[in-house]
Image: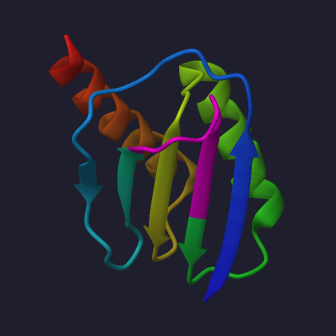
């Protein structure tokens, strides 16, 4: 397993108080836990992945995700079993959309 961490600053979107879990850890998939955290407006992402050596790809996917959502005070934990970048983006968007809907 490889652990990657990413941190983004100056987010503007805050989400509902309850955590959200989406996805299932299995071959070719992943789970995402997203929750509020006091991070001074930042967004912290930790990825635990079975696919070693893909840090640059993860960084590109996380940068794209943050640009789309601009999350503030948010902690995201990802457990990955070899998901493709498209599946990673889908699961992240799915988690955020669930929290945005409930925040309305």
Q: Residue at x 72, y 47 (%)?
A: 7
Rendering colour mode: rainbow
x, y percent for residue 82: 52, 73
**Magenta segment boundaries in residue numbering:** 36-46
- Residue 42 on the magenta segment: yes
Where is residue 79, by image quadrant? bottom left
**In the figure, is residue 19 to the left or right of 3?**
left
Q: Residue at x 70, y 62 (%)?
A: 5
x, y percent for residue 67: 67, 23
Residue 64 lies, with reference to residue 3, above or below; the image says above
Q: Furthest-top residue in view?
A: 104
Residue 90 lies, with reference to residue 4, above or below; the image says above
Where is residue 18, by image quadrant? top left
Quarter of the image that includes the C terminus: top left
**In the figure, is residue 66 to the left or right of 79?**
right
x, y percent for residue 35: 37, 46
Quarter of the image that includes the N terminus: bottom right
Residue 92 lies, with reference to residue 15, above or below; the image says below
- Residue 80 on the magenta segment: no
Q: Residue at x 26, y 52 (%)?
A: 22
Compare residues 22 and 39 and report the one nearer the observer: 39
**In the figure, is residue 37 to the left or right of 63?**
left
Residue 39 lies, with reference to residue 10, above or below; the image says below
Q: Furthest-bottom residue in view?
A: 1
Total count of labels:
0
Q: Furthest-right residue in view?
A: 56
Q: Residue at x 53, y 34 (%)?
A: 73
């Amino acid at each position: 397993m490889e652990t990657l961490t990413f941190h983004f600053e100056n987010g503007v979107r805050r989400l509902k108080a309850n955590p959200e879990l989406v996805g299932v850890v299995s071959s070719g998939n992943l789970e995402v836990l997203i929750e509020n955290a006091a991070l001074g407006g930042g967004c912290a992402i930790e990825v635990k992945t079975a696919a070693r050596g893909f840090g640059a790809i993860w960084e590109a996917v996380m940068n794209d995700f943050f640009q789309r959502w601009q999350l503030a005070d948010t902690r995201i934990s990802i457990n990955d079993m070899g998901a493709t970048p498209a599946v990673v983006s889908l699961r992240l968007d799915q988690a955020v959309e669930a929290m945005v809907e409930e925040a309305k």
